[in-house]
Amino acid sequence: MQLDEIVAAVRAAHESHSPLRLRAAGSKDFYGGLLAGEVLDLSGHWGIVAYEPTELYVTAKCGTPLSEIEAELAEEGQMLAFEPPHFAGATLGGAIAAGLSGPRRQQAGAVRDFVLGIKLVDGTGQVLDFGGQVMKNVAGYDVSRFIAGSLGTLGVIAEATLKVLPRPVAETTLEFACDEAEAVRRLNEWGGQPLPVSASFWFEGRLWLRLSGAEAAVAAACRKLGGKVSPGAAAWWQAVREQTHAAYAGPTLWRLALPSTTPPLALDGLRAIEWGGGLRWYVTEAEPAVVRAAATAAGGHAVLYRAPESLRCLEGAFAPLSPALLALHRRLKKAFDPRGILNPGRLYAEF
Amino acid sequence: MNPPEPSFATDRAKLLRRLQLILPAHCLLSAEEDLRPYECDGLTAYRELPLAVCLPETEGQVIDVLRNCHQMGVPVVARGAGTGLSGGAMPHAEGVVLSLARFNKILRVDRAARLAVVQPGVRNLAVSEAAAPFGLYYAPDPSSQIACTLGGNVAENSGGVHCLKYGLTVHNVLRLRVVSIEGEVFEIGGEGPDAPGYDLLALLIGSEGMLGVVTEVTVKLVPKPELAQVVMASFADVAQAGDAVAAIIAAGIILAGLEMMDKAATAAVEPFVKAGYDLKAAAILLCESDGTPEEVAEEIARVTAVLTEAGAGEVRVSRTEAERLRFWAGRKAAFPAVGRITPDYYCMDGTIPRKRLAEMLSAIAEMEHKYGLRCANVFHAGDGNLHPLIMYDAAKPGEWRWAEAFGAEILELSVALGGSITGEHGVGIEKINQMCVQFSTPELDAFRRVKAAFDENGLLNPGKAVPSLHRCAEYGRMHVHQGDLKFPELERF
């Protein structure tokens, strides 16, 4: 599939005012709001365009599976440091559009922190290049980072350049027994110290901590922290990253992004804590308004992450925006997709 | 689609009457001698006097100023410490300067959550100083950090010498409180890892005061590394030094700082700071490792081996903190040191893929002959951000124009080599023409639509950062994108 074909499809949809649903592997069909419009299958726009290990970037077309990119990077000892989940065959475009990051986000940063450039086909079918392949670039508004997490509502991410990083030389996972409150306290205490913590996970009274870095640094941190070395950790972190771990199972899974120091919420159904206390997962049948209110009161927000489509469409997957911010979102949507044809309703029902 | 560039004609008397109603006398300047200090920022070659300078002390006053300017159609240029190097804070002749200098309070330093909430007029270094008792600091460290403010850092997405490992401003800001040109307050981002909706932080940070006025900034604080050490290496050849940088990265080492200085730069700074630089070297590299003592020892050993393998002449490792600071002193003093050997200098800010460095430096050497001006080069080698310092004498007729043309040619070459016209200083007024080279008409149109989504009438910092279509037509340069020159087989140097 060539760029021209994407452009032609978007242009035609723009002209006929018909909605398009952007999709490649469909690994995140569960995520967000309404799935509306005719599917524009982007899985055929495939391939690594450029990979320069010493310049620390990779450029690929949107339909390229993450697994293919990561295999290429691994040969040079490098990685996508935000550890995006693959689910079933996730592609580069979808990973950026959904903006989901994995366990290492705690140390390395989120998807948007690694986006260097984007080739975007906007809602009128124009091809726009933002950013580039260099680490520092402040010419013009930072549209490429802004696109990350916009769920395909602003344009088709036809191609993207991501910063890559070397894989850590050493990695060890430690295990501790502690309750929720204690886990939050410890995670924040460790976060304030120069320790090479690259991931954390609390589940059913146990806390796992992954240390990554130079051999000597990891060994020194292990001596300092104590705990028990957890065997088979690589596969286990993979289950966290892919959310195949038991913690994520349940009919209605909520993702709460909170200030990391937030004490235990008065909300039943906590399943897991990640990202040094900043990400908490709940499986609960509580009223969505109750869950949202708890997250908001703590200074964060709640996403109705995995739930029946009817519930997501009824309640909205994402926390509602203030009137001023909603108005701004609508104007920005219009700036990139004036006829509102791209993934309408996927982020918010209002646009 | 593209209205002509808006022109403004402000009724000065009416504007001042209105401002007097909303601001106490000590918060409003309008006499020419009081306005004079605001006529330019760190890029002194571009100057303009505003109609008035507002120095609000409360967010309510900021809202009132913006609301009134919005009603009257008056341009507003927000300003921090005025240390910017691209003329981004240069006033508008028909507008007001909105100085956030009095928003200078650190509102909260949260040790446990590792964040600080500050007003935009707080100096960059003051944040790290306030966090120091907790063993924390604010990572972005632009060289002007003793003076520049967080508000200005947000506007420019400022970097510094530690970006490769610790990121730019955009990677270190969690939340912003913003006042729109209509005087509406909104908050974006949050203290958690993300926020609902579009990533507006990414748009606002680096927007050069074009989208809103920031009244509060929440930044991430990180633990101060236990130890930092610097390796200094000299190279007989610039290309060799560039290859050494690539070899370090290929070895999987992400250093805290990785800087290069060419011979002209070391020659300028050595008499000034006595850092002990090898003056015979064509280029020197400064490689900083930080972390735990164990980590640093391991990294320094690996870097030293890579540098030696890459053909470094002399390789020295700082033995004490005093020595580390002395190695850095020369790099940090590069701008003032060059200022001592020339009446004026013009600092450029292009970014290039690291592997094109030797090409860029030899092209700059040719330009020195072409324009009859000398140039010293300092380079954030780790992230490809080059700061050529073009030396000129503003007192000599025409020399500034040559310096400007020299700079423009460097920027255009940066784009042709696959880089960008600005890595950290911003476009401002300085590089506005080169925006027409880096971006196509539809891309610039998209920027204009983004701008209009925040500021429909174009009152915030008009004439900066994003050129009008008309301006690009007048400038008449071809748009080259990511190295795709029209005739790639032709030599350009």
Image: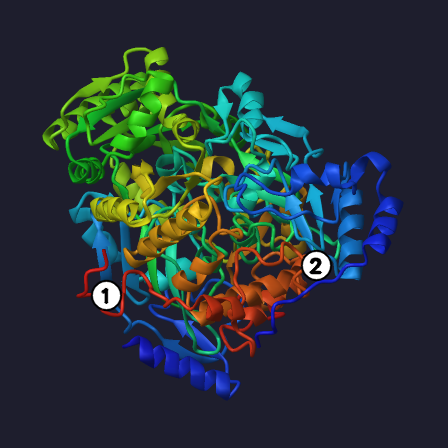
Front residue of this view, candidates A32 and B424: B424
Q: Residue B332 falls in which quadrant of the image? A: top left
Q: Amino acid at mark 1?
A: Gly
- Callout 2: 10 Å neighbours few (<14), some, many (20+)? few
Q: Is residue A218 left or right of residue B125?
A: left
**x, y (%) of residue A84?**
36, 52
Q: How many marks can you see?
A: 2
> B68 left or right of B363?
right
Q: Quadrant of the N terminus of chain A?
A: bottom left
CA–CA distance in space, label 1 to label 2: 41 Å
Residue holding disc 2: A324
Label 1 Cα neighbours within 10 Å, binned few <14 / some 14-19 / many ≥20: some
Amino acid type shown at disc 2? Ala
- Do circles 1 and 2 both sit on a common chain? yes
Res A168 seen here: yes
The residue depicted at 24 percent of the width and 48 percent of the height is B366
Residue B341 position by quadrant: top left
Q: Chain ID for label 2?
A: A
Image coordinates for residue B155, horizontal then vertical, percent? 56, 46
- The residue that disc 1 covers is A47
Q: From the viewer's perspective, is residue B238 above or below residue B127?
A: below
In this rendering, is residue A317 above or below A268? below
Q: Which residue is painted at 21% across and 65% down in the image?
A: B488
* Vertical position of residue A87 compared to residue B426: above or below: below
Q: Where in the figure is residue B422, as x and y percent of width and height?
A: 42, 49
